[in-house]
């Protein structure tokens, strides 16, 4: 009887180890506010640390005030960002104004940081065409994408355009959540950008849940960062509740892409504290308090606040004054948004194409005639 042959390929070993290079999230300060990488921490000046804290406080205040407006029935769709401040503001701080942002519907804070106004963010939630005035002002940002993952394909195309136009020190960048990595557009986008070695950074904000579907049932991949490998895209995990680590990784990814090395995939490990959206989602139906508590303990504002307080750079009075100032600004932005002119059918048609087609041009005249009566 022939001896049992050895495995030609040890698939079990491959499966058990293929995520190993991606399971060491970059971190500078841990959830207790302890500095765990002094060399990286020392790259920040005191002023930079304060600026990053101010940006997170700004986003937290934006979330709180915008949720209040939503509860009052003064907005349409809104996707909360509570808990994702370090991920979003760390990345926004690393990008430059000449970069092209392709936001998803949860990325209004990054869009505003990139040059849109809070008023325009609120008008987008209301479905008003004036929400996109930032495009006419020259802000390099697309319309927030509602279709899950579609922004990955759009952004990859823009990155190729940057390369073909010979633009220097410029990238395209975009965001999706953990659920978005299960979409075909995710793979098509990273593969396209990689094939053409286009200057692109793809961000995956792994906040644990795709509405009510947990990350563990979205995919069998142990990390989302490793999903870039099949397309030749280097990936990395970063502690997305640590704004210092997130900023440094985003900056290095950008530097790598603009140097002509092709795209990068960055997975930020973060958490959506609240509901998926203001449209009736109830996270208490699918999440437990036991699951949530460790993440609340990792609150990004708490950990950086401790570092700054220990360095005598921050205090509660300063933060309270900032929150009050920001919320007053958001209230004024809402007043301005509510004062926008009522929309007409002709307005929508005029903004459908840069140059209206003959049929659309005819419809514009038809509706303008009706609206003038």
Image (spheres, rainbow, N blue to C red):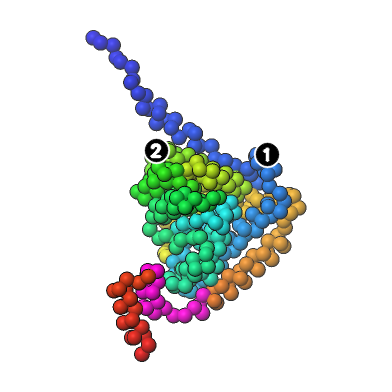
Question: What is the secondary structure assignment of the residue under circle 2?
Answer: helix
Residue 358 sits above or below residue 212 on the image: below
Classify 78 as above or below 286: below
Determine the residue located farthest toward the bottom in the rendered image.
Answer: 373
Q: Which residues are magenta?
A: 337-354
Q: On the rendered structure, is 121 left or right of 51?
A: left
Closer to the camera in the image, 71 or 136: 136
Disc 1 target residue = 39
Q: Kindly identify which residue carries mark 2.
A: 230
Residue at 37% x, 78% y: name it: 346
Q: Is residue 231 left or right of residue 71?
A: left
- CB atoms of marks 1 and 2 within 8 Å: no
Q: Quadrant of the N terminus?
A: top left
Q: Is residue 104 left or right of residue 62?
A: left
CA neighbours of label 2 inside 10 A, class few (<14), some (14 to 19), many (20+): few
Residue found at the very far top of the displayed protein: 1
Q: How far is disc 1 from disc 2 in space, using C-alphas?
A: 33 Å
Answer yes or no: is residue 322 visible: yes
| 193 and 25: which is toward the camera | 193
Q: Which x, y percent locates residue 122? A: 50, 69
Task: Locate the C terminus and report the quarter of the image it occupies.
Answer: bottom left
Indicate whether residue 182 is drawn in magenta. Answer: no
Judged from the image, the secondary structure of the residue bearing numbered disc 1 is: helix
Between discs 1 and 2, the one toward the N terminus: 1
Front-lying residue, 297 or 211: 211
Q: Would residue 341 be counted in the magenta stretch?
A: yes
Q: Residue at (50%, 41%) from the top-left corner?
A: 261
Residue name at image x 68 percent, y 47 percent: 44
Of tags 1 and 2, which is closer to the observer? 2
């Amino acid at each position: 009887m022939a001896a049992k042959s050895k495995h030609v390929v040890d698939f079990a070993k491959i499966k058990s180890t293929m995520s190993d290079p991606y399971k060491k999230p970059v971190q500078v300060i841990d959830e207790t506010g302890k500095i765990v990488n002094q060399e990286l921490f020392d790259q920040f000046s005191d002023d930079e640390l304060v600026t990053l804290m101010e940006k997170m406080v700004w986003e937290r205040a934006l979330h709180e005030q915008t949720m209040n407006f939503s509860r009052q029935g003064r907005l349409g769709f809104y996707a909360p960002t509570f808990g994702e401040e370090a991920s979003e503001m760390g990345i926004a701080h690393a990008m430059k104004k000449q970069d092209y942002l392709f936001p998803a519907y949860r990325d209004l804070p990054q869009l505003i940081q990139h040059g849109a106004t809070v008023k325009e963010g609120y008008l987008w939630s209301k479905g008003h065409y004036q929400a996109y005035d930032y495009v006419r002002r020259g802000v390099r940002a697309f319309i927030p994408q509602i279709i899950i993952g579609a922004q990955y394909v759009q952004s990859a195309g823009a990155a190729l355009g940057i390369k073909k136009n010979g633009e220097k020190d410029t990238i395209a960048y975009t965001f999706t959540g953990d659920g978005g990595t299960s979409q075909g557009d995710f793979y098509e986008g990273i593969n396209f950008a990689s094939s053409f070695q286009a200057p692109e950074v793809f961000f995956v904000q792994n906040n644990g849940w795709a509405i009510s579907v947990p990350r563990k049932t979205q995919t069998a991949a142990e990390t989302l960062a490793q999903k870039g490998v099949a397309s030749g895209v280097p990936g990395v995990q970063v502690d997305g509740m640590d704004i210092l680590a997130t900023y440094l990784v985003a900056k290095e990814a950008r530097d790598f892409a603009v140097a002509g090395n092709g795209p990068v995939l960055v997975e930020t490990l973060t958490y959506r504290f609240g509901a998926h959206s203001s449209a009736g989602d109830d996270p208490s139906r699918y999440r437990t308090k036991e699951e949530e508590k460790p993440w609340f303990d990792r609150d990004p504002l708490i950990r950086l606040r401790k570092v700054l307080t220990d360095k005598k750079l921050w205090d509660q009075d300063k933060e309270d004054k900032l929150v009050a100032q920001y919320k007053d600004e958001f209230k004024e932005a809402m007043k301005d948004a509510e004062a926008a002119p009522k929309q007409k059918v002709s307005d929508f048609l005029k903004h459908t194409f840069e140059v209206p087609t003959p049929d659309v041009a005819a419809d514009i005249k038809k509706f303008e005639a009706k609206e003038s009566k």
